[in-house]
Image (spheres, helix red, strand yellow):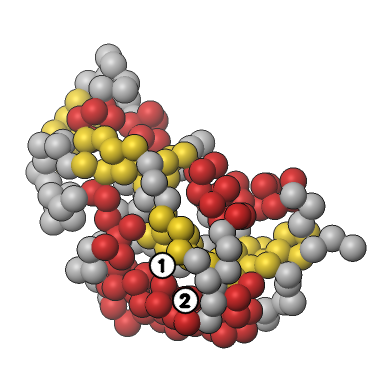
Amino acid sequence: MALKAVVTGHLGFVGRYLSLALNGLGYEVIGLDLKNGQDIDICYLPDADKVFHLAAQTDAQFTQAFWDAKTNIMASLRIFEYYQDKVVFASSSMVNYPVTPYAISKRAAEDYARYFGCAVVRFCNLYGENGHSVIDKFREQDTITICGSGEQIRTYAPVEKAVHALTTAPPGQTIVLHGDDYTVNEIADMFPGKPIDHVKAGKLDIMDGRQRLGG
């Protein structure tokens, strides 16, 4: 009988890659995703041998702290309490800059995950087919749009590297996913010939981009 793996947020960018990898490792994957009407706040939690908790409120600029915490802290806590050290929690490098509800909630969820003996994998910006990072956006854009000077530094890793970290992370350990540092201008240089449009930077764009999951 195949081992069962629950993947919350299995229809998201990382979730799709992870689910395919788990199938390749012989797991029967059970997906829980809001896109299928499965709200991890209240949905049925099936038995599993391993649980990968990716579901989250992922908008780094979301300002409604209560609703952010409802998903990223309280719903995560429900997962951690139920599955204990079977869980691998997908976190973000934004925990290093806890100045937004998203970053604060991810940092709190990390603490709860470690309390229950879960593994934590802290993502940097991830890129790959169907991704949402600056690299992926610039690849798809006919005209590259850069916020501010373009000298903001971000750290990038391929999504496959994140999947490997998730599937090998030991219980109770925190894995920080390392990647390569690029300025936005350096990323734009990867796509020669495309016109570039500079726009005024927003509040988050002028901060060190390593905090921003997805770009």
Crowdedness near tag 2: few (<14), some (14–19) or many (≥20) residues, C-alpha within 10 Å: some
Specify whether residue 160 is in view.
yes
Q: Residue at x 18, y 55 (%)?
A: 204
Give the image location of residue 81, x and y in percent. 57, 85
Is residue 30 shown left or right of residue 72?
right
Location of residue 184 with respect to 39 vertically, above or below: above
Give the image location of residue 53, x and y in percent. 55, 67
Q: Which residue is mark 1?
A: 57
Location of residue 108 with respect to 130 vertically, above or below: below
| Image quarter of residue 48 | bottom right
Q: Nearer the viewer, mark 1 or mark 2?
A: 2
In the image shown, does 142 or 92 lie closer to the viewer?
A: 92
Q: Residue furthest top?
A: 193
In the image shown, does 195 or 151 lie closer to the viewer?
A: 151
Q: Which mark is residue 20?
A: none
Q: Residue at x 74, y 46 (%)?
A: 24
SS type, badge 2:
helix
Looking at the picture, which amino acid does disc 2 mark? Arg
Q: Earlier in the sequence, mark 1 or mark 2?
A: 1
Location of residue 67 with respect to 20 vertically, above or below: below
Give the image location of residue 168, x and y in percent. 60, 55
Q: Which residue is mark 2?
A: 114
In the image shown, does 8 or 62 lie closer to the viewer?
A: 8
Specify whether residue 55 is in view.
no
Looking at the picture, which amino acid does disc 1 mark? Gln
Q: CA distance from mark 1 to mark 2?
A: 20 Å
